[in-house]
Amino acid sequence: MEETLNKKLMLSVVAGLKDGNLDPLFAALHPDIVWTATAPKAFFRFGGTHRGIAGMKEYTALLFSRYSFIAFEPRSVVTSGDQVWGLFAFEARHIPTGRIVATDISMRWTVKAGKIIAHQGFFDTAGVLMQQGELTAAA
């Protein structure tokens, strides 16, 4: 039962994010959340580790100042106890350039008493930078 609830939690939060609705995310956060976006801060201002609700407000402000989500579709969500892993197809408009970027995003959550207490997110940062026109392939 807990695993089913944890899966529904991830899917509902991602559905809200896709629509620009942060309410499901903030309702799902444990006050001691540790949210890690494994992206270099030099290229992705929202990268790094953000702690607590204040840290999440900063994270979301930085993220949505650069990207407008178009698609955030589940490919797979798997649970095991308090762990939830999700793979999502992601598409967004990069606001500074107007370019559309697409990549897969993997997320791992630890859920405690129905709240997200830890997040780690992964995506192809080099691929996204190339799509934004900020990185070129080596010759």
Image (tube, rainbow, N blue to C red):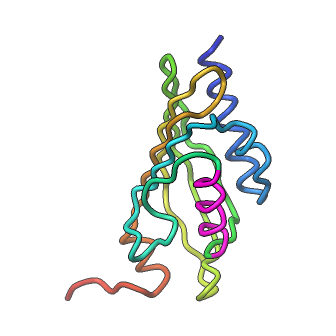
Q: Residue furthest top?
A: 1
Q: Main secondary structure of the magenta part?
A: helix
Q: Residue at x 79, y 54 (%)?
A: 21
Judging depth in this view, the residue of 134 and 41 nearest the camera is 41
Of 74 and 61, nearer the camera is 61
Residue span colored magenta: 54-65
Residue 3: image quadrant is top right
Displayed quadrant of residue 89: bottom right
**Does the magenta-highlighted stretch encompass residue 123?**
no
Q: Is residue 47 left or right of residue 55?
A: left
Q: Residue 134 at x, y = what percent?
A: 42, 86
Where's the C terminus, which quadrant?
A: bottom left
Give the residue drawn at x 65%, y 75%.
65
Residues 104 and 9: in front is 9
Tell me residue 79's x, y (percent). 52, 24
Front in this rendered view, residue 58 or 127:
58
Kindly identify the residue that appears in the image at 59 percent across and 88 percent down: 97
Q: Is residue 68 left or right of residue 48?
A: right
Image quadrant holding the N terminus, namely top right
